[in-house]
Structure formats: C-alpha cells, structure tokens
C-alpha cells in the first residue's frame, strides 16, 4: 500500500476500460454566486424514500413545525434508518400519497407542509470543536442529520463511514461531476470551498486515512483553482483527471486514481478505499459544526426554457413546478421531456408536481433533438459498440436479450448488478435501443423477486419455528400428562391400599365384636332357662 500511495502522490494516473468523450454542454453560469430559490407554497416530503423500514410520524396534521425539526422516528435503531426533517417552518396540512421522484412514477405516502414564510429554525446544537467528541458520536450526528450520498446512489453516509472505521487507507473525495449539463458541485466548490475543507477535516478525524485525494475533471478550471488555494499547507492531494465519461463513477474513479479494481459483488471498503461525494462532505460540515440537518441542496437548472444554466440552493421537498415558475422563461409549463438528473443517467418524470429530493442534482429540459424517442428503436445489428464503451466491462448486448426475455438468472450470471446505468451503451447504439431502460426494469424485477423470496423464506422459517415450537409444546404436554397419569395411578394404588386396609380394619373390628357378643348371649340364655 505504501508504494501505491507514493505513486499516487507522484501524480500517476491510470485509466478505466470503455467510456466515451462527448460535448459536456457545461455552460457555466455568468452569476458565480449561488442564488436561493424562494420558499414554495407547499413542501412535499416522501416518508419512505430513503428507507424501507416502518416509520412513525412525530407531528400530526394541523401541528406547527420548525425548520430542521425531525418529522419521523424509526421503530428500531437500524443502520439504514434515515431521519426526515422539516425544510422550513409551517403547518402540516396533509399526509397523503403523492407521485415521487422515481422512474416508476408511483405514489408514496408524503408529509405535506404549508410554509408560514418565517423560516424559523428548530433549536440547533453546533459544535465549536468536533475533536472533543469521539468518532462514534460524530457518526451518530451525521446519521441524525439525515445525510446520504448526494452523488446519486443515496446510500446512508453514516453507515458508509461507520463501516470504514479502521478499515480504509485512502479517502477519495469525488468532485469529478462527469455528467453532461450538471455544474452543481462545480458551483458549490467555488462558493463554499472553506466549508468543504472543514468537512474533509471532520472525516479525516473520524477515519484517519493514510491519504486523502480530491478528484476533479480538467474542465473545471475555476473550481480547481479554488481547491488548490484552499489546500495549501494541508495534507490533501488535488488530482486533476482527464474529462471522460463516466469518470465520476465510484469504481471508475478508483481505477483512475489507484489502478485498483473493486471485485464484482464487493464495495470499495473491501479494498481499503472510501469514496465520498463533495456535496455530502459539505453536508457533513454543516451537520457537525453548525448542527444543521440536510434540508437543502444545490440543483442545476439546464435546458431550452432557461435563459442560462443556473445553480440554485433549493429546499428539499420543493415541487419542480415552483422552480420552473420562478426561473424559467416559458409561461406554458407543458414539456415533451422533463428529466430529473443529467441527460445520461437521469430519468423522465410525468409531471412537475414531483418534489426535489436529497439526490436531485439537476432538472434538465432538453430540446427534441437531444432525446431519442423509444419509438425509434430498431433491431440490434451486433456491432459491438456497446461492449467497447462499457466502463464495467460487461456485455450489454447479451444483458439486453436476457432482460427483454425476463431470464433474470442469466442477467445475474452476466453481472447485471455491476451495471452503473451510465447510459454509455445506449448513447453509442446505432439502433437507438434504450438499453438502460431494459437494465433498470430487470434490476427492479430481480429486486422485487428477491424481496418476495426473502419474505417467503422468513415466512417458511416462521412456519417451521411454529411447527417446532408446537411439537415441543406437545411433547412437553404429553410428558406432563404422563406424569399426572402416573401420579394419579400411584394415588389410586395408594387409595386402593388405604381402602383395603380400612376394609380389613372394619372386618377385624366386626370379627372382634362377634367374638365379644357370643358369651353375653350364653349368659342370657342360661338365665332364662333357670327362670
């Protein structure tokens, strides 16, 4: 590991297989200072977006809540539990199903808050010196702040950090932001660089890695300069990597910086590496040093209806419609395509009522020629382009066949779970096949089948446990009844002996009485004869 660290420090870079280079369309905003979106008329907070655990809502309908106030509690202290907080002050007016930010377009139970406009904070507990707290205490603060991976996956940051304790050698801060159109992290670095460095210092204190590397693509000169200036006299390496998609993928970034590969079915922690998105690092600083939960994030607004690309601070739970009303130039809000995320890994959503979530980094409204319609799909010509650009070294063509045929065991055999859904295969496909859509559908069905299988297995275990318990109870009952029968039998025998003994005593007594009565009768007879 020491030799690898020396190579990294010397500036050596490697490359990952596949990938593509294309116009990034990263039109940097003229306004460098981040703007704040207005407080919307309503806040929509999905209850189970980040955890499958059952939760209890703390406040009731009609109650007033403050900004940053916890809204749910979990039945148990499971690691995957992520708290939800009110993102502004106001009244809870409903708890009802709403469409959420998911490709399925399904509804989910949501807490609806009507803001009062005061934006009054719930009492915070900032830390002046985080080094006075133990790493476990700091991880718990990260958890209670509701921080997740804000680069897209949305995995609980506290769980990821806790799993890395005394296990990692290299900490990688991901500022690559390789997705086209998105400049949210770029703007965050330029406007909040000092707080980002503080966040890195917090993680450094908790994990004590041997090396910290910030990776950023070379198409962000202003952000690179900010990082270089802020890390002077600090043991943090800034590594500028070539612009290539998807270099921001976790496994691809590890390959570029270390030449190490994460084995299939494993995670970076298994090879001594932790990767954290730079937005999550900023959120960690706010949680630890300022006591603030994750209630807002930077979102890029890109597309034809905006006069320019914008990066804005947006409250979590803000309906997309509110942002379009405030920042777009079009009065008619009907769009042919509305994409949550970038043009490569984003997904279409059915309407503008869907709220911003913690993983939403972009709202993209493309031109008609920027999106391929599913109606244009043609038969595969087996050109092999998709295999050439796959950064995970998969076989997209075969995976698409198996996914389409619902041969899910074959999909798993060909490592579908290693697909990062980057969309490179679909981008280069001359037949315009929406490959990623097939993969997502297959993954969803595999996940559903696994959940049902696990549920069936749990039910089977419960049934078997019940049968075993009933069998043991029956055996215990039979043993108990046997003991009672034996005791009763012994009692009957004892009673029989007692009865026989009593009868024998009575018989003896009767015999004695008979013997005693014989002389008396003789005397009486003689007396009568004399008379």
Image (cartoon, rainbow, N blue to C red):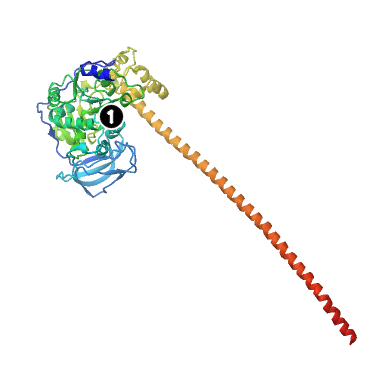
Q: Could you tell me residue 216's position as x and y percent? A: 19, 22
Q: Is residue 516 left or right of residue 284?
A: right
Quarter of the picture holding the N terminus: top left
Regarding residue 295, the answer to whether it shows in the image is no
Q: Quadrant of residue 285?
A: top left
- Residue occupying the far top of the picture: 383
Q: Could you tell me residue 500's position as x and y percent? A: 73, 62
Regarding residue 366, the answer to whether it shows in the image is yes
Residue for point 21% across, 33% down: 202
Depth check, front residue: 82 or 233: 233
Q: Is residue 194 left or right of residue 5?
A: left
Q: Could you tell me residue 481's position as x and y percent? A: 60, 51
Q: Residues within 10 Å of mark 1 (few under 14, many from 20)?
A: few
Depth check, front residue: 39 or 289: 289
Q: Of helix, strand and loop, which one carries label 1?
A: loop
Q: Quadrant of residue 13?
A: top left
Number of residue marks: 1
As drawn, 154 above or below 370 = below
Depth check, front residue: 349 or 451: 451
Quarter of the picture holding the C terminus: bottom right
Q: Quadrant of residue 95?
A: top left
Q: Could you tell me residue 341's position as x and y percent? A: 23, 28
Depth check, front residue: 186 or 343: 186
- Write down the residue under mark 1: 153
């Amino acid at each position: 590991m020491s030799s690898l660290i020396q190579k990294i420090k010397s500036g050596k870079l490697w490359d990952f297989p596949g990938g593509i280079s294309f116009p990034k369309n990263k039109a940097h905003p003229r306004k460098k200072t981040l703007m704040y979106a207005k407080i919307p008329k309503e806040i929509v907070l999905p209850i189970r977006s980040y955890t499958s655990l059952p939760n209890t809502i703390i406040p009731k309908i009609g109650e007033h809540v403050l900004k940053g106030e916890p809204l749910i509690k979990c039945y148990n202290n499971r690691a995957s539990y992520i708290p939800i907080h009110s993102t502004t002050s106001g009244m809870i007016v409903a708890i009802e199903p709403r469409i959420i930010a998911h490709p399925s377009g399904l509804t989910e139970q949501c807490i609806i808050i009507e803001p009062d406009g005061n934006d009054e904070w719930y009492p915070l507990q900032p830390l002046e010196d985080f080094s006075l707290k133990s790493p476990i205490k700091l991880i718990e603060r990260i958890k209670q702040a509701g921080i997740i991976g804000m680069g897209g996956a949305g995995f609980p940051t506290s769980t990821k950090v806790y799993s890395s304790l005394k296990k990692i050698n290299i900490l990688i801060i991901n500022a690559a932001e390789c997705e086209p159109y998105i400049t949210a992290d770029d703007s965050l670095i330029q406007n909040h660089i000092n707080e980002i460095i503080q966040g890195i210092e917090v993680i450094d204190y908790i994990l004590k890695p041997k090396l910290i590397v910030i990776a950023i693509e070379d198409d962000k000169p202003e952000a690179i300069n900010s990082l270089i200036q802020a890390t002077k006299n600090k043991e943090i390496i800034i590594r500028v990597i070539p612009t290539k998609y998807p270099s921001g993928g976790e496994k691809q970034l590890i390959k570029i910086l270390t030449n190490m590969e994460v084995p299939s079915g494993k995670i970076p922690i298994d090879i001594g590496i932790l990767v954290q998105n730079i937005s999550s690092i900023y959120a960690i600083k706010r949680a630890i040093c300022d006591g603030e939960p994750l209630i807002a994030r930077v979102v890029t607004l890109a597309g034809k209806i905006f006069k320019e690309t914008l990066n804005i601070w947006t409250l979590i739970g803000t309906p997309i419609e509110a942002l379009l009303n405030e920042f777009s130039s079009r009065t008619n809000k009907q769009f042919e395509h509305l994409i949550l995320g970038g043009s490569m890994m984003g997904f279409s959503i059915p309407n503008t009522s869907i709220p911003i979530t913690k993983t939403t980094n972009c709202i993209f409204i493309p031109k008609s020629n920027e999106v391929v319609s599913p109606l244009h799909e043609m038969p595969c010509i087996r050109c092999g382009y998709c295999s050439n650009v796959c950064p995970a070294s998969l076989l997209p063509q075969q995976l698409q066949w198996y996914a389409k045929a619902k041969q899910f065991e074959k999909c798993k055999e060909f490592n579908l779970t290693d697909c990062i859904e980057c969309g490179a295969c679909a981008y280069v496909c001359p037949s315009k096949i929406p490959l990623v859509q097939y993969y997502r559908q297959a993954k969803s069905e595999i996940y559903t089948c696994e959940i049902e299988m696990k549920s069936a297995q749990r039910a089977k275990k419960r049934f078997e446990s019940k049968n075993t318990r009933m069998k043991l109870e029956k055996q215990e009952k039979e043993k108990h009844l046997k003991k009672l029968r034996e005791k009763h039998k012994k009692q009957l025998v004892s009673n029989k002996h007692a009865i026989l003994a009593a009868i024998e005593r009575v018989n003896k007594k009767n015999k004695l009485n008979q013997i005693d009565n014989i002389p008396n009768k003789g005397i009486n007879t003689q007396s009568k004869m004399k008379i």
